[in-house]
Image (spheres, helix red, strand yellow):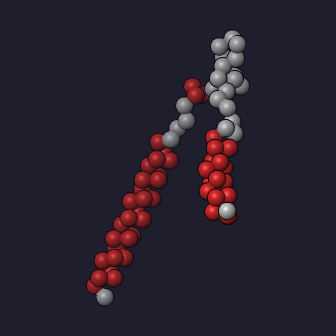
Amino acid sequence: MKKLIIIVSLIVAPLAFTFAQPNPGNNSGGTPVGGDPIGGGTAPIGGGVVLLLSMAAGYGLKKVFDAKNKLEE
């Protein structure tokens, strides 16, 4: 019975989070809810992507370097 409760809760809990915030849509005049976006409505993600990729590459190089040193010992 405990397994059934756990399985049901694991299925139902994520569904509650998907309905947490509805799509805001548009006002009756056609303008976005909350007003027009500031700065054209786009988020600058270029710097974050570069940072993420460089950190991933550094981590990969460290793992390769550590594995190489372990084989030499």
Residue 66 lies in what quarter of the image?
bottom left
Q: Residue at x 69, y 36 (%)?
A: 21
**For this view, does 53 lie left or right of residue 44?**
left
Whole-percent x and y of residue 33?
Answer: 69, 23
Please state which of residues 17 and 44 is positioned toward the viewer in this rendering. 17
Whole-percent x and y of residue 17?
Answer: 66, 44
Residue 44 appearing in the image: yes
Quadrant in which the C terminus is drawn: bottom left
Classify 9 as above or below 34: below
Classify 64 as above or below 52: below
Please state which of residues 20 and 63 is positioned toward the viewer in this rendering. 20
Residue 6 appearing in the image: no
Q: Residue at x 50, y 47 (%)?
A: 48
Residue lying at the far front in this picture: please name it. 1
Whole-percent x and y of residue 40?
Answer: 57, 25
Q: Residue at x 58, y 28 (%)?
A: 41
Residue 63 lies in what quarter of the image?
bottom left
Q: Residue at x 39, y 70 (%)?
A: 62
Q: How many marks?
A: 0
Quadrant in which the N terminus is drawn: bottom right
Residue lying at the far left in this picture: please name it. 72
Residue lying at the far bottom in this picture: please name it. 73
**For this view, does 63 lie left or right of residue 72?**
right
Whole-percent x and y of residue 25?
Answer: 64, 23
**For this view, does 46 lie left or right of residue 57?**
right
Classify 65 as above or below 58: below
